[in-house]
Image (cartoon, helix red, strand yellow):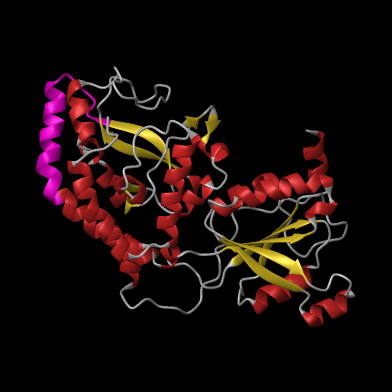
Amino acid sequence: MAKAQSLTSGVVQADWPLPAAPRDSYQPPWPASWWRYISPPRPKTGCVLVIVTGEADERAIQSALSARGIRGGIAGICHTAGTCGRPSAFPIIHHAHVAAVLRGGGITDVVFAGRPEMHTTGVEIFHALFEGLFGLPARIWLAVDISASFPAAAKIRAGGYRLVPALGEHQMSAGAPLKRLFDIGGAAVLLALFSPVMALIAAALFCSGTTKIIYRQQRAGAGGKLFHLLKFRTMTTPDDAEFLQARPGDCRITRLGRWLRKNSLDELPQLFNVLAGHMSLVGPRPHAPATTVAGLSLEDAAKFYRLRYRAKPGMTGLAQIRGQRGATGNILTLEQRLSSDLEYIESWSPWLDLRILLRTIPAVLRPCNAY
């Protein structure tokens, strides 16, 4: 607690949320109203958050940003080892507020600068921030000081910092409007096809004595944001009951619910989640925040688990068509699914989505680990 107080001493907190990132003159080839509905336009020029451990020349960092074509400017600076000792031209952000600032929007790039190994107080915060930002929607850069021994003026002229990408935009991010259009069209068609089936399932559940047909549960979506996932009710547990993964022979599952789960029909209401923009037709399956493996949270059990948050969760995915479904019983199982999810995110294309959707059909007809 004392460390946290020392880091905030003398820090001027900025007013948040930050102003929207400046937009360039790019105009989409379709009406603006359609573009806004498909996906909010992402600025090519963005606002930058700089995370510094120790000393870092702000003007040299600005020069490095310009060299990379990032023209939005620095929106704020976070000092992990306390204040820099001299006035800053930019708002100062406490490290505890970094994730909230990024989730608030407007920040497109995060730059890590300084020498964390030289500061025992800041090194742990530096590494925690670096890993914690994996799942948030921003590119991550490392500012490498190639002229540490140069005087300040010479450093600026020489462009003393070089920005090295640590985590950039993946193909799915670049194709987000196309993927969103694919999701809206696909979900609308599937709802039209399956609406009679969904009506019959709702009637069967009501006749079996289930008064609440739809089950709502919090799941972690893109950027780690929580949303309410919709399913047909297949268990006797209420919505606010303590989370516990379903197991083979689970006594909480009703007889009708067991058949629905075996054939994945309980997932059909998630088409409304897709239309609402919380989910995608294809993507990593969303997990409940309370899910644990070997007594650890999923984020602690698998080091790069947060990278899944860089994509919207999906109704089906690469892991599911490979038979990697059901309860996550151990860390090895989690890592295998995570590997499939990250492979999908990095190699995404519209054709991959289409192939996964088509391969989902035989996977549902021949269920594996579904209970």
Q: Is residue 144 above or below residue 129?
A: below
Q: Spot the residue most to the bottom.
A: 157
Q: Residue at x 75, y 57 (%)?
A: 52
Q: Is residue 224 above or below residue 112?
A: above
Residue 144 located left or right of residue 227: right
Which of 363/1 is in front? Answer: 363
Q: Spot the residue most to the top.
A: 251
- Can residue 94 be seen from the camera position used here? no
Total marks shown come to: 0
- Can residue 224 be seen from the camera position used here? yes
> Quadrant location of the N terminus?
top right
Locate residue 94, reporting x and y percent.
Answer: 72, 48
Locate residue 127, reporting x and y percent.
Answer: 69, 49
Name the chief secondary structure element in magenta. helix
> Quadrant location of the C terminus?
top left
Please identify the quarter of the rendering in which residue 320 is found. Answer: top left
Q: Is residue 76 above or below residue 193?
A: below
Q: Residue at x 40, y 52 (%)?
A: 312
Q: Residue at x 33, y 50 (%)?
A: 317
Locate residue 161, reporting x and y percent.
Answer: 75, 72
Q: Magenta span has 208?
A: yes
Residue 106 located left or right of residue 155: left
| Boundaries of the magenta span | 192-214
Please identify the quarter of the rendering in which residue 172 is found. Answer: bottom left
Q: Spot the residue most to the front.
A: 332
Locate residue 334, reporting x and y percent.
Answer: 46, 39
Which of 345/137 is in front? Answer: 345
